[in-house]
Image (spheres, grey):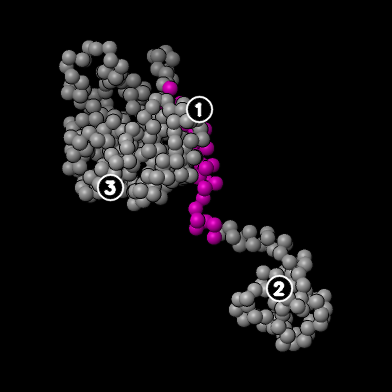
Amino acid sequence: MNNYLQSTKELIVLEVANNHQGDFEHGKKIIDVYSEIIKEYKNIFDFAIKFQYRNLDTFIHPDYKKSDLKFVKRFLSTELSEEQFLNLKQHAEKLGFISMCTPFDEDSVEKVVNHGYGILKIASASLDDWPLVEKISTFKNIEVIASVGGSSMEKIKRFYSFMRNHDIEFALNYCVSLYPSNQEQLNLSFIHRLTDQFNDIRIGFSTHENPNAYETAGYALHTGASIFEKHIALEDEEKGYFQNDYSVYPEELKKWLERLKEAKIVYGNPKAREKIVPLELEALRGLKRGVFASLDLEVGTEVEIDNSYYAIPADENQLIANDLSKFNQIHINKITPKDSSITYENIELLN
């Protein structure tokens, strides 16, 4: 197992779904174009490219294969062969992507594992598809990310317990299964609840907003998400290939990644603050009041409120008002005239 979920980088999943249009060359072009987009971000994020597997012979009931149902027509019209999917997978891996795939039936689970994908994805619709989930649980050599769109907390807990009991390495993606999702429907605060409830696994955000919604991934990052899934597409006007309402084009993804990078920089981490505090203290020293003698101080005199006062500016080596506390005993070791600054060189300080 590759342990991609153990990485300290955020994982960006680019979902091709059916946007390859059943056209192998178009699918390959999507991978090529987006591999160029991510180059400047690969030192910041990990990137995966994701496909979907369905055994259409059994996934769609025979009586409905010629129907006008939206999903039936879409799946059948964009079908790729097993060999074509494998070629796309290998091409993506050659360009530095982690390979990832969503199986929608038991046969496809076996193909995802046998084809050597790095990560298996469980779609929101399949979170409680127990025949499918049971099948996935029989394989221990692949990591799993599951989306929880439309699921109650009780359902999510049940899935979590099942995966834990079967010793599966997995993560959960918060998801709003509305295509597209508007801002009022996102409720990203729920990510906080997921990170609190399941604090031993990674939590992500699978997005289906309008293509020009560039800020939401950054908000999700600040609520605890570390995996981000985004649908991608590529226009080909001659062939009639265009984006849908929740997939991005390359320039839109670049803007989205840029906002996420900025959010990551602003968010930082607690350990990094340790490097900033000394700089803050240096900047704040100019505002701190220095300690001055309010009368002539003899050697051995304890510095107290009654024989000192505080004013700016403070010399670099001068005692400051912050030093005068019940935690310190300060005695003069050199005669200090009235109105003179009391320096660290001229005192004995006992903490």
Image x and y of residue 156, in percent: 30, 41
Using the rendered view, name the quadrant where residue 51 is placed. Answer: top left
Q: Residue at position x 43%, y 28% from top?
A: 181
Image x and y of residue 200, in percent: 34, 52
Task: Examine the residues drawn in magenta and state their main secondary structure.
Answer: helix
Task: Name the residue carrying label 1.
Answer: 212
* Mark 1 to mark 3 CA distance (whole Å): 33 Å
Determine if residue 279 is in view.
yes
Report the disc number at residue 169.
3
Residue 30 vs residue 272, the one in the foreground:
272
For marks 2 and 1, give the one nearer the viewer. 2
Image x and y of residue 41, in percent: 47, 40
Report the disc number at residue 251.
none
Using the rendered view, name the quadrant where residue 78 is placed. Answer: top left
- Element carrying mark 3: loop
In the rendered structure, which segment of residues is drawn in magenta? 245-274
* Mark 2 to mark 1 CA distance (whole Å): 55 Å
Task: Name the residue carrying label 2.
Answer: 319
Badge 3 crowding class, 10 Å Cα cut-off, few under 14, some 14 to 19, many 20 or more, is: some
